[in-house]
Amino acid sequence: MELATTYTYDVVIIGAGPAGMCAGMYAGRSMLKAVVLERGFPGGELLNTELIEDYPGFETILGHELAQKFADHATKFGAEFRNGVTVDCVEKRTDGRFETRTDSGDVYESPAVIVTAGGTPVKLGIPGELEYAGKGVSYCAICDGAFFRNQTIAVVGGGDAATEEADFLTRYADKVYLIHRRDELRSSKILQQRLFANPKVEVIWNTVVESVEGDEQGLVKTLKLRDVLSGEASDLAATGLFVFVGFRPNTGIIDGHVDHDDMGYLLTDTNMHTSIRGLFAAGDVRSQLTRQVTTAVGDATTAAIAAEKYLKALADGHPEEPITGTGGYTA
Ligand SMILES: Cc1cc2nc3c(=O)[nH]c(=O)nc-3n(C[C@H](O)[C@H](O)[C@H](O)COP(=O)(O)OP(=O)(O)OC[C@H]3O[C@@H](n4cnc5c(N)ncnc54)[C@H](O)[C@@H]3O)c2cc1C
């Protein structure tokens, strides 16, 4: 039996998406001993995004290429990555230090933690959804789109992800139905323009998917729909259902009360400090107006620099001192 190990770091970063990798880079540049714990591979949602067109400096870049660049950059400045490590829980001890416990039993001890764990796709919660997950039901267009070449599929949702991915999926599918429960989309206008200009996409308004049904091979065959205005039921023949109805922040790992908004996203001050001193949050886990790669790395920059200042105050014996300073901008 392998024995669990306790590791000691200056700062533990939970999640290697854009925010975690950027926090790792800045922590490394500040000469902090930093580790980025990632349950999968570095990249986060970038690995689920085919093309990024709105990251400054790159007119277009593949999501996985940008992820690799982020990881290489953080590694170059000394951040350590531990992949395949799932964090179960992070807890502040009575001595003021944090214990980050992982699925292997290993514990990472540190005076500061930056949570960059992103979010998890929201499920529809309808019969057949989980049964056919991976057999036609998907939450990731770039991962699974190619399985639906020349087929008829459906996308559910009305936000940016649903709009963008319905358009993207027409690279593979012959026909993509976008099913939305309202009579207008919530997505940005430029994404809507692209979608409406795509002849392979048809929007089914004011409609919900009530269940997913399969064929004798256990693959998705039919979607049971209901018009929310008329109450009328109908069947849609489709071999795939892509669900993009939102994300839930991955904040369940925090033991003890931490301030959050109604949706569970972490509340921070402008230094990315949560209500738990020494615990910082950045990226999609944080309550904010928008969630993009740019905002994730912006948050992470602030979080890493604030963590460094917090550690300095701690070393000087003033852990309650407000975090202030030029933040790297020197006139
Ligand atoms: C389909 C889609 C398309 C998008 N397109 C764009 C776009 O074109 N441009 C743009 O700017 N943004 C886009 N976004 C949004 C952007 O990807 C996110 O805002 C960004 O990835 C957030 O970064 P993050 O590091 O906060 O979180 P994430 O990217 O979600 O990374 C979080 C990481 O934490 C890890 N993690 C979670 N829990 C644990 C745990 N308990 N233990 C260990 N590791 C854990 C996860 O595995 C993940 O790697 C898109 C998002 C989606 C879903």
Image (cartoon, rainbow, N blue to C red):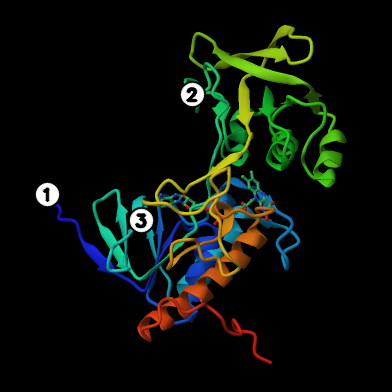
Cβ atoms at labels 1 and 3 below 8 Å apart? no
Label 3 residue near ligand 1, CB within 8 Å: no
Q: Amino acid at mark 1?
A: Met
Measured along the vertical axis of the image, is residue 51 above or below residue 331?
above
Which of 80 and 287 lies nearest the eye of the viewer?
Answer: 287
Q: Amino acid at mark 2?
A: Leu
Residue at the farthest bottom position: 331
Residue 169 pos. (x, y %):
69, 34
Q: Residues within 10 Å of mark 2 (few under 14, many from 20)?
A: some
Cβ atoms at labels 3 and 2 below 8 Å apart? no
Measured along the vertical axis of the image, is residue 52 above or below residue 34?
above
User: CA separation, marks 1 and 2?
Assistant: 35 Å
Residue 254 pos. (x, y %):
40, 52
Q: Is residue 151 visible?
A: no
In the picture of the structure, the residue carrying the numbered disc 1 is 1
Q: Which residue corresponds to the image point at 52% horizontal and 77% vertical from the top-left?
A: 323
In the picture of the structure, the residue carrying the numbered disc 3 is 90
In the picture of the structure, the residue carrying the numbered disc 2 is 130
Q: Which residue corresponds to the image point at 70% horizontal and 36% vertical from the top-left?
A: 162
Using residue 146 as the reference point, say whether residue 196 is left or right of it: right
Measured along the vertical axis of the image, is residue 247 above or below residue 226?
below
Label 2 residue near ligand 1, CB within 8 Å: no
Residue 140: quarter of image: top right
- Identify the secondary structure beneath mark 1: loop
- Identify the secondary structure beneath mark 3: strand
